[in-house]
Image (cartoon, helix red, strand yellow):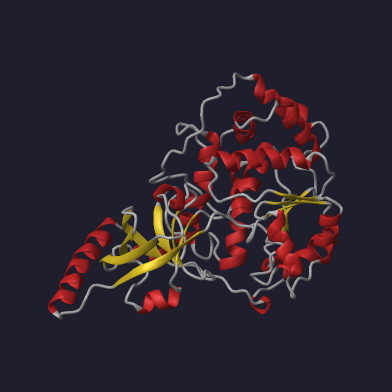
Amino acid sequence: MKQKRILAMLLSVLCLCSFACKGESVPEVKDLGVIHEPEFGGVYLKMTIDDFNAKGFRYGDSVTVRFSNGYTLDDLPYYSGYYVNVGEQLLVAYPGYDYIKAAINYGADVWDLAGLDESMTATVTLKARGTYLDVQEASNIQYQDDRIRYPSDEVFANFRVVNVGNLRKNILYRAASPCDNQHNRAPYVDALIAQAGVNCIVDLADSEAKVQKYLEQEDFNSPYFRSLLESDRVILLSMSMNFQSDDFKAKIKQGLIAMTAHEGPYLVHCTEGKDRTGFMCMLLEALAGASYREIVDDYMVTYDNYYDISGQKDKAKYDTILNRNLVAMIRYIVNDDSVDITSADLSAYAQKFLLSIGMSEAEIDAFLRCITESGEASALRAALKQPVHRTPYTFRHIDALDLRVHPSRVAN
């Protein structure tokens, strides 16, 4: 990989020289308007993906973004997806976005970091051709929004029950959104949760205002979601993607405490049922005593559903996704780089994490009684008889991990 990167850098120098020799200008776009995108955290630059690429930019290039207030993001990889590690910057052209976007993956909001307002503009300049092309080619994944391309409604909706660890049978479900139909999945999710008898929805993505907009759209066709909303059984958390932020952690606490006021089964969802849902389900599964292997298998079903990626079909991409996303999330919860997360008692670490974000032992017990088999709350509580070190949770960057994982696909 390093040799490829060095070669790419040399080729990029030659490429930029060739622009100069031919009298051609290096690809650049100036004075793009900026729009704050708070849900995922970042800055939309007002140029469509197709128009930006037509200016000569290619996925895998290195670019520089300069805002009119002087704030500069240098040597950003330009990718078609979030193909960087947690906390790293990129310029992304995610399929379905109206514009290109400067962002930090699962990290702080670039809008706030740069001190931007809507009167400002941005200029994007090619820094080097193909510097990150190896990562782009190795990571490139996209999915379709046509039901006919998927083998079942469940796969299309990314819908499944989470029966792992000591969770009560059929108490916890996860899926794409049953109300936000931007990916054509909401009616399918709605029908599936009605069939499963879901009694309470934990919506990680939406606010009351956003849900009201969904209800007013002509293609809204989720009557079961509407019925739960009207009976106050939808918990709206409107969380960002930054699982390291104080706001994210405060809303985890808010959501879990709110769940105890309702009987299950519960549905946890965001937009795609992938990132925020992935973190929340990882935390709940760990809390309920699931093993590392059970958590991994459940998380990676999403990538099989959307992208047809599994350990058997494409191990390289499987391992990249696993290490870049889920392993980083688990390590954040554990907060100790010396711990072997593949064999650790993750329930103890999950409970300590919840204590660190302000939940009381009584609140954790009440939640465990809602989601685990009878008697499991007291059994899991024994782990907390050990000293609890209430140290601040900080993210530790993960460059490389050798977890000796042998992935396996679980059935939906």
Front residue of 72 and 277: 72
Q: Position of residue 24 (x, y in %)?
A: 20, 79
For residue 146, above or below residue 242: below
Q: Residue at the left extreme?
A: 21
Q: Quadrant of residue 361 in the image?
A: top right
- Horizontal relation, residue 340 to residue 147: left or right: left
- Horizontal relation, residue 46 to residue 182: left or right: left
Front residue of 251 and 373: 251
- Horizontal relation, residue 343 to residue 368: left or right: left
Q: Position of residue 228 (x, y in %)?
A: 83, 56
Query: Which quadrant: the N terminus?
Result: bottom left
Residue 14 showing in the rendered view? yes
**Residue at 15% of width from left, 79% of height from top?**
23
**Residue at 65% of width from left, 51% of height from top?**
238
Residue 342 showing in the rendered view? no
Query: Which quadrant: the C terminus?
Result: bottom right
For residue 42, above or below residue 292: below
**Residue at 33% of width from left, 52% of height from top?**
71
For residue 92, above or below residue 336: below
Front residue of 321 and 74: 74
Q: Position of residue 123 (x, y in %)?
A: 33, 65
Q: Position of residue 76 (x, y in %)?
A: 34, 58
- Horizontal relation, residue 123 to residue 370: left or right: left
**Residue at 59% of width from left, 43% of height from top?**
248
Q: Give the mark count.
A: 0
